[in-house]
Image (cartoon, grey):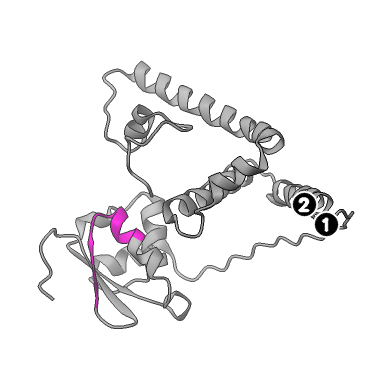
């Protein structure tokens, strides 16, 4: 997560970011409510602005916005987070995300075909989500308390739940599942988020130090 509060203003002002990241205290409850209402309005109008951008921003400007997408990992993370934010918000309200994603992809492909291939196309979009419970978060928390290893994804889920402060541990041993063996980028971002030091132990194991001391390993 990008925690630089002083970036140029986007949807959020620097003051908004500082508040959401816990770096700015509100002296009165009313001030807190006002800030939260202001942020909600800005998010809503930012979403509405995307329709304006989609239909009016020039192709040149759109390409310049996305030109460093493969190298700019912060921007790529932000792009993923924007989809995740929309997914969470829609599904929390009982809206099947397919109703958001499928029309968007279909119309985009139809427009691309018309502009780039001078053709009319039919577009088949398949979107399916299957979730399988592998571990419970109380179980992950218990393993952390016992000093046992957890996977990076388990640790991430526990952090996102918000009921367990991972930074209370001096060290967290992480074990990569087979599917996560190459996910060093994710593991690095997780370490940065916790302000910790990542020490590679083996190809499948790593140590996340949160005690602020040099590893010497």
In the depicted view, which residue is nearer to us: 176 or 61? 61
Between discs 2 and 1, the one toward the N terminus:
2
- Is 68 displayed left or right of 110 in the figure? left
Tell me which corner region of the image, top left, top right, bottom left or bottom right, holds residue 144. Answer: bottom left
Farthest residue, direction right: 120
Above or below, comparing residue 66 to residue 149 in the picture: above
In the picture, measured across the screen, residue 140 lies left or right of residue 166, that is: right
Label 2 neighbourhood size at 10 Å, few (<14), some (14-19), many (20+)?
A: some
Magenta stretch encompasses residue 91? no
| Residue 197 on the magenta span | yes
Q: What secondary structure is found at the residue carrying circle 1?
A: loop
Q: Which residues are magenta?
A: 189-200
Dot 1: few (<14), some (14–19), or many (≥20) neighbours within 10 Å? Answer: few
Q: Position of residue 99 (x, y in %)?
A: 74, 47
Q: Residue at x 28, y 52 (%)?
A: 165
Residue name at image x 69 percent, y 33 percent: 56
Q: Position of residue 198 (x, y in %)?
A: 25, 67
Residue closest to the far front? 60
In the rendered image, which residue does mark 1 sit on?
A: 117
At a point 28% along the width and 83% down the height, the residue shown is 202
Residue 43 higher or lower than 156, as above or below: above
Secondary structure under the numbered disc 2 in the rendered image: helix
- Residue 112 is marked as 2
Discs 2, 1 touching: Cβ within 8 Å: yes
């Amino acid at each position: 997560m990008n925690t630089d509060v002083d970036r140029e203003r986007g949807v959020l002002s620097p003051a908004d970011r500082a508040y959401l990241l816990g770096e700015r205290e509100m002296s009165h409850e009313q001030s807190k409510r006002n800030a939260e209402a202001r942020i909600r309005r800005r998010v809503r109008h930012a979403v509405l602005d995307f329709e304006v951008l989609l239909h009016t921003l020039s192709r040149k400007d759109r390409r310049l916005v996305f030109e460093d997408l493969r190298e700019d990992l912060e921007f790529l993370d932000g792009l993923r987070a924007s989809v995740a934010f929309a997914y969470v918000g829609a599904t929390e309200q009982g809206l099947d995300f397919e109703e958001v994603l499928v029309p968007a992809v279909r119309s985009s492909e139809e427009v691309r075909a018309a502009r780039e291939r001078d053709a009319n196309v039919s577009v088949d979009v398949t979107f399916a989500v299957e979730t399988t419970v592998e571990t419970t978060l109380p179980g992950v928390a218990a393993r952390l308390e016992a000093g046992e290893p957890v996977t990076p994804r388990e640790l991430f889920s526990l952090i996102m739940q918000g009921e367990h402060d991972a930074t209370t541990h001096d060290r967290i041993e992480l074990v990569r599942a087979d599917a996560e063996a190459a996910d060093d980028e994710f593991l690095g971002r997780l370490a940065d988020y916790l302000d910790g030091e990542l020490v590679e132990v083996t190809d499948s194991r790593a140590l996340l130090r949160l005690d602020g001391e040099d590893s010497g390993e």
